[in-house]
């Protein structure tokens, strides 16, 4: 029952995370009609009688597009920052849990029990060695460590994978939007200049903290025993 509840909670967490990811994306389909409107205005004939009206309409359309794009980028950037912060806390927790498992494994090895590699993964050999220690009737209690540490590591790596996918998709969406815009408005526009100024100041597109998290994840699963093998 306890295990079932844990899996149910994990499933709910993954579902919630998927919904949050969907809400955080830059939505191409929401921006495409604004670009199409600019294209239609630009196709109108340059006649003296409607020149000012056309220019005013075009300026309004460009501004509406930029405000929508800026809002979408800021939304995605805010989600990126919150996820990075969450992963940094999660990484600290994972490291702590794995250290506890290593302490347990070292305790068992010191008593001549086989745990395989002392790697911080609470796998079948560690479970078997702990059971053997308990059944032996020794008075010294083993250090506390949770069998759920494997799930904690797996969830951390899974969330990090979702973050990398989130970044890539937002890159692709923005590139696709730019291509669609340039096909209808051409290069050298105010939109292009604004975008070039916006992105370097946006964490989503400069990805601070991501490399550190990837290195931490690699360090967590490094060695002879992978998460899958330990399971």
Image: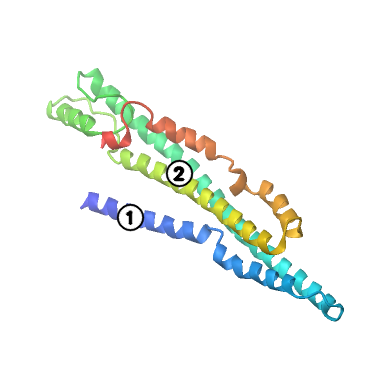
From this view, report whether residue 19 is shown above or below residue 91. Answer: below
Task: Pick the quarter of the image with the C terminus.
Answer: top left
Q: Which residue is mark 2?
A: 160
Dot 1 crowding, Cα within 10 Å, few <14, some 14–19, many 20+: few
x and y percent of residue 85 in the render?
52, 45
Q: Which of the two residues, 58 or 105, is positioned nearer the viewer here?
A: 58
Disc 1 element? helix
Q: Nearer the viewer, residue 136 or 168?
A: 168
Q: Is residue 78 visible?
A: no
Residue in the picture at 16% in, 30% down: 134
Q: Nearer the viewer, mark 2 or mark 1?
A: 2
Q: Give the camera-side residue of 52 and 4.
A: 52
Side of 164 relative to 37 (left or right): left
Across and down, in percent, residue 83 comes to 51, 49
Please tell me the numbered disc located at residue 103.
Answer: none
Residue 48 left/right relative to 168: right
Closer to the chain start, of discs 2 and 1, is: 1
The residue under the point 64% across, 49% down is 202
214 horizontally vs 12: left or right:
right
Callout 2: SS? helix
The relative height of residue 17 versus residue 86 in the rendered view (above or below) is: below
Q: Dot 2: few (<14), some (14–19), or many (≥20) neighbours within 10 Å? A: some
Q: Residue at x 41, y 34 (%)?
A: 95
Name the colouring of the figure. rainbow
Residue 162 relative to residue 81: left or right? left
Question: In this figure, which residue is indicated by the disc labeled 1?
Answer: 11
Which quadrant holds residue 43?
A: bottom right
Q: Estimate the x, y position of residue 76 in percent, counting from the top left.
A: 57, 55
Q: Residue at x 48, y 56 (%)?
A: 21
Residue 11 pos. (x, y %): 33, 55
Give the image quarter of residue 228. Answer: top left
């Amino acid at each position: 029952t306890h295990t079932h509840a844990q899996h149910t909670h994990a499933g709910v967490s993954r579902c919630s995370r998927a919904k949050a990811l969907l809400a955080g994306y830059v939505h191409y389909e929401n921006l495409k009609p604004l670009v199409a409107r600019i294209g239609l205005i630009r196709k109108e004939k340059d006649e003296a009688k409607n020149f000012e009206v056309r220019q005013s309409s075009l300026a309004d359309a460009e501004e509406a597009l930029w405000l929508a794009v800026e809002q979408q980028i800021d939304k995605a950037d805010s989600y990126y920052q919150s996820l990075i912060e969450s992963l940094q806390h999660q990484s600290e927790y994972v490291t702590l849990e794995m250290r506890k498992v290593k302490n347990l494994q070292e305790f068992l090895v010191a008593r001549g029990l086989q745990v395989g590699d002392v790697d911080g993964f609470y796998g079948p050999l560690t479970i078997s060695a702990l059971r053997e220690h308990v059944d032996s009737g020794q008075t010294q209690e083993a250090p506390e460590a949770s069998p759920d540490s494997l799930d904690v590591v797996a969830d951390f790596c899974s969330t990090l994978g979702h973050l990398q996918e989130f970044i890539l998709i937002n890159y692709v969406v923005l590139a696709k939007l730019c291509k669609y815009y340039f096909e209808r408005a051409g290069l050298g526009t105010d939109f292009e200049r604004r975008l070039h100024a916006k992105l370097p100041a946006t964490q989503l597109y400069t990805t601070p903290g991501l490399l550190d998290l990837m290195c931490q994840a690699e360090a967590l699963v490094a060695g002879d025993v992978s998460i899958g093998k330990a399971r």
